[in-house]
Structure formats: C-alpha cells, structure tokens
Amino acid sequence: MKLSKTSPKIIISGGGTGGHIYPAIAIADEIKNRLPDSEILFVGALGKMEMEKVPKAGYQIKGLPISGIDRGNLLSNLSFPLKLQKSLKLAKKILKEFKPDIAIGTGGFASGPLLWQASKQGIPVVIQEQNSFPGITNKLLKNRAEAICVAYEGISQFPTEKVHYTGNPIRSEIFKNLSNREQAIHSYGLDPEKKTILSIGGSQGSRTLNYAWKSDLKKLQDVGVQLIWQTGKLDFDKIKTELDGDLKGIHITEFIYDMKTAFSAADLIVSRAGAMAISELSLVGKPLILVPFPFAAEDHQTKNAKALVDKNAACMLTDSQASTELVNTALDLIQDTNRQSLLSENLIRMGKPNATKEIVDILLSKIK
C-alpha cells in the first residue's frame, strides 16, 4: 500500500477489559512496525486497566472520566450523564491538541466519547468489533464509522457495505508453530505418554471450571488423563489445600504466563468463550470445549461459542452443564480421535492469522 503520509497521527481508543485493550495494542504495534515515524495516542477510561497496560506496552495514554452502565445497580448510573458530558468535552480537547489523521476504536465505553467527537470533526473513524454480538458503544457508532472490522461473519447489526471480515488482531506469532509436545509436557512434570487437558478460565480463573475439576478429579486420575489446570488467583490456595498433595498427573497453577508451552502440551483445551481467547485458540487448532461465562454483557460469550459450534469447530457446555458434565465430556472427547480431528480441522479454517495486518491496511487506506 502506498501512503502519501509516512508519519500519520493515529488515535486509538478502547478499554475497560483486556478484550478491548490487547487488540488495540496489537494494532498499534503493527502500525509502528510499518511506519516507525507514526505518532500514536491512546485514549481510555480513568481508573481502568488500560491506564496501566498501555504505558507498559510503550504508548502514551490519556484518560476520560467515563464509566459503563451498571446493569446490576441502577442507582450507580445516576452520575453517568455528568461523566459523559465531561468526557465528551475532554475528548474534543484531546482531538484539537493531537490533530489525528484517523481514529480507531476497539470497543468498550472508553471509546464512545472519543470516536463520537472525532466523527463530528470530520476525522475518519474505524471500528474493530471482537465479538459475534456487538457491544453498545460500537452499535451506537456504526453509522459514524467509515469501516467496521469484525471477527465473525453475518453480524446483522452493522451496515453491510462498511463491514470487513478480518478476524481479531492478536500477536499471531505466539500461537503458531508450537513447540515440541514432549518437551512441553516434561516442563510441567507430566508424562508425554498420557493424554493431557489444558483448562484455562481467563485471567481471573473460573469458579465453575475449578469446582467441576475438583469434584471429579479422581475420574481423570483413574484413566490416566493429565490436567494442566489454571485456577486463577481467587481459588488457587483453597484448591491446593483441599487436594492435600493428591496431584498425580495434575499440574495446578494460579496463572499461566507461557501460553505457547501450555498450548503445545495440550491434547484438548477447555476454555471460557471470550472473543480474544477464541481468536487465539483458532490459531492453535487443538480440540476445544467452550464454557461461556453466563454473565458477560448481553450473553456475548454464548453467542461467540455458538458461532463455532454451528460450524462443528468446538464443543460447548453451558455453565450449569459444566458443573456436572465437564469431566465426562472431556474424557469422551479426548478418547475420540476422529471427533478431535474434525473439530481441529474446522477450527483452523476459522482462524484469521493475518487479522492485524488486514485491519491496519484498512485503517491506513482511510487516511485522507
């Protein structure tokens, strides 16, 4: 792509959760790799995790006093109109000072005021939607965007002529060309001759998955199936104490930092159904059981999971089903090699390894 400007000024907004922040950082990294002289500014929400994560990734960020709508406590929303008004005013000031050539939003309430003001000022706006069911902010901004990059096909809430099916922007090199399975399993102190399940419940862990494994752990041990079990911080100490050293064939950990080794060791993966997790797992291509978090906004994790199930690319258990059926379902699948192969083949077909490149191509093409 030929650009008339090799040092564009680009503003990126999104946050509230890692699912909005890490795609934004992946996009920024791709821009910097291509155009080292570009200027990038992030805009997030004060007090949210992007205010810490973005500077750690090497980028400047400014915060707005915006907050999301609390569906569980309506009284807490009384201050929302004032926060929105202040955020719109500050966003306008940031745009006036930075003078971006384009703005991109990766979702979450943090991106709303900034992209709204950018569109009013005639600055081109691009939206990146991670989930199969769009969030409130992106639905509100759909008519103001020049392009909308999506990770799932057939999202009816967006204007068809603006939609680009790119996939989610991730650091794909982490999830491709996995390391040697035998060495990976040895690194966890486990036996390479035995089938191994990897359970990942998100950065905070999953109480549903934790209790399901704990209640039926002996079934795994009796048939010689191993488990790499990421519990999350909240349950780790309690579970380890309750197991009382009965960890034959089990590697239990609070958090997994080296995901590439964990993916390499796994014959089967059990995971929540966040959009970014699914995008990563599609590149890994291992047989997959998804257990959507039932309290995600507008139940979007269930919609994410069903998009894979409909293409025979994953199995799904509801949260309530997982409590009693997870271990039996996992054992049935890990012993069914034909079913595993079919799921893996279909899952890999859904992977979008060039998503970040394609999104940046679209972004740069919209610079006037």
Image: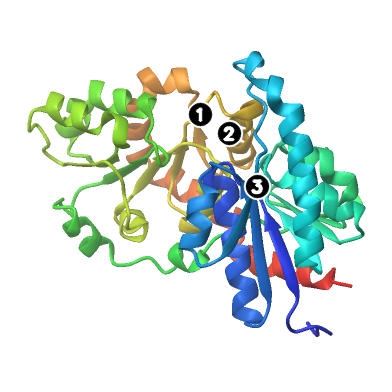
Question: In this orientation, which residue lies closer to the viewer: 181 or 175?
Answer: 175
Which of the 4 image quadrants contains residue 349? Answer: bottom right
Would you say residue 236 is visible in this rendering? yes
Q: Please indicate, yes or no, whether residue 156 appears anywhere in the rendered image.
A: no
Provide residue 114's location: percent of width, then percent of height.
76, 50
Point out the image quarter for the C terminus. bottom right
Residue named by callout 3 = 130
Q: Earlier in the sequence, mark 2 or mark 1?
A: 1
Q: Residue at x 62, y 27 (%)?
A: 299
* Pick the front one: 114 or 260: 114
C-alpha gap between disc 3 and disc 1: 16 Å
Residue 301's disc is 2
**Badge 1 density bin: few <14, some 14–19, many ≥20, Cα 10 Å:** many
The kind of residue on which mark 1 rests is Phe
Distance Cα–Cα, label 2 vs label 1: 6 Å
Q: Amino acid at mark 3?
A: Gln
Q: Residue furthest left?
A: 245
Tags 2 and 1 touching, CB below 8 Å: yes
Q: Position of residue 366 (x, y in %)?
A: 85, 68
According to the picture, the residue beneath numbered tag 1 turns out to be: 293
Q: Tell me the CA gap for discs 2 and 3.
A: 11 Å
The residue sitting at 31% across, 59% down in the picture is 261
Q: Is residue 251 left or right of residue 141?
A: left
Give percent across and percent down for residue 296.
57, 29
Task: Determine the secondary structure under disc 2.
Answer: helix
